[in-house]
Structures are given as C-alpha cells and as structure tokens.
Image (cartoon, grey):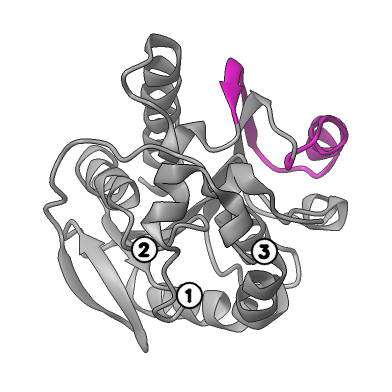
Amino acid sequence: MAMQSCCITGFEWSGTPTGKIGKLGKLDTYIAGDNPDVAILVIHDALGWTFPNGRLLADHFAKEANATVYFPDFFFGEVIDPAIILEGDFSKFDFKGFLERQGREVREPEVFAAAKELRRKYKKVGAVGYCYGGWAVFRLGAKEHSPPLVDAISTGHPSLLTAKDIDEVAVPVQVLAPEHDPVYTPELKAHTLATLPTLGIEFDYHHYPGVEHGAFVRGDDRKDGERKAMANAKNSVVAWFNLQLH
C-alpha cells in the first residue's frame, strides 16, 4: 500500500473557482453551494485543497448535484511545491515523509470528524475522494459506523486502499477506474468487482479505457481522450449523488 509519482502528476485546468473559504470544524475549507439539506464532502488528492481543479469540481458538484459542497484542508496547511508537478522531477518529493505526516492513521480522525459535523447539519451526506481521498471515503462508508456517517460514497483512482476497506463498505459506492493505474491495481479492481455484489449494497463501477491514474482530477484537458474521460467521470459522480442524496 503506497503512493507513487502518478499521485502528484497532473495538469492545472482553466477556470476560476467561485466558492468561498470557511470552516468545517477546525479545518479550513472551500465551500460551494447553499443547499440546506444535502452536503457533499470532497476529500482531496495528494495535491491538497488549494489545487484549482479540486475546487472547480466542487463548484460543478454544488451546481449540478444541488448540494452544499465542502472541500477541506486535511493536510493542515502542507502544500506540495507546484514546481515538482510542473517539472516532473519527483526526486524532490519525499513520499515516505509525506505519508508519515499525512498517512491514513494520522488523518482518519479528522476525516471522521468532518463527516460527523456534516451529519449533524444535513439530512443527506455524500463523500467523494480522488487518489489519496479514496481510502478515506471507503472508511467513511464502513460498516463499523452505526448510524452511517455518510449515505453514499464515490471514488476515482483511489490510493492507499486495501481489500479490507472494500470488504467492509456498507453504503452505496461508486468506483471510477482508469485502465492504467499502478496504485488501484488490477488485483484490487478484481477484488472490488468480486466483493461488492456480495455486500447487499448498490454499487456503480465505471471503467475508463486508455486513461491513467489521476485523470479525473488532474488530466490534460487538451487531449481528446482525457478530456472526454474527465467529463464523463464528473457527470457520473453528479448522477450518482443526484440518485443517492435526493
């Protein structure tokens, strides 16, 4: 269970986020939308809450899934140097140190606390996580929570995910899977497809041929294939939450 250079590779999209900065509990948070009954928690990838693409997706979800969308800073101010991404020189990035500071065991309490805060305020709560956020949404949807912390989850190219996370999910789950992904491996994909039908929950699995890990939030919108996959993946998340939260 690890992260690789594909987790911090990507392109910055054009567009200007239109939400506001506020708080979710003690977390600095980008907030979009104003539905008083429905909330979506977006758990960022390794590039964090300031990367514009995540905020643009939050804007889309707020408008198209009619929700108040929260995109918190689960890294507590740590931001990866954009030069590493632009230059593609991953020798400058300390993956081991990053995971010691921001790993699952470190950040899971904050993820749970954020969802509990939303659950107190909203009638329906969904959670979507990309890359680093993938393990987190599965943990939010785990059977150990009674009542459930969230009503449905979605993930795109999840990282740090385990077979046990998949085995224990207990809420409707959507998975967006690129064809080429060294982190969400063929073995994990096969386990997902073998396990979810046995759990008695709704699931929605999408396979995207020809694209790589990171494509749904950091893909190159100048390439036809990636642009189409990004748009389709965003639309799939919107449709999923419209189905599950309304």
Image quadrant where residue 243 sits: top left
Of labels 2 and 3, earlier in sequence is 2
1 displayed left or right of 177: right
What residue is shown at x 43% (from left), y 31% (from top)? 219
Image position of 89 (left or right of 207): left
Among the two numbered marks 2 and 1 on one chain, the one whose residue lies closer to the N terminus: 2
Choose between 22 and 12: the one closer to the eye.
Answer: 12
Residue 176 place in picture, x, y as percent? 58, 32
How far across and how far down the image is residue 237, in percent?
43, 36
Image quadrant occupied by the C terminus: top left
**According to the image, label 2 marks what residue?**
49
* Disc 1 secondary structure class: loop
Say which of 68 and 208 sits in front. Answer: 208
What's the amino acid at mark 2?
Trp
- Residue 75 is marked as 1
Determine crowd level at label 3: few under 14, some 14-19, many 20+ residues with C-alpha closer than 10 A: some
Amino acid tagged 1: Phe
In the picture, measured across the screen, residue 191 lies left or right of residue 16, that is right
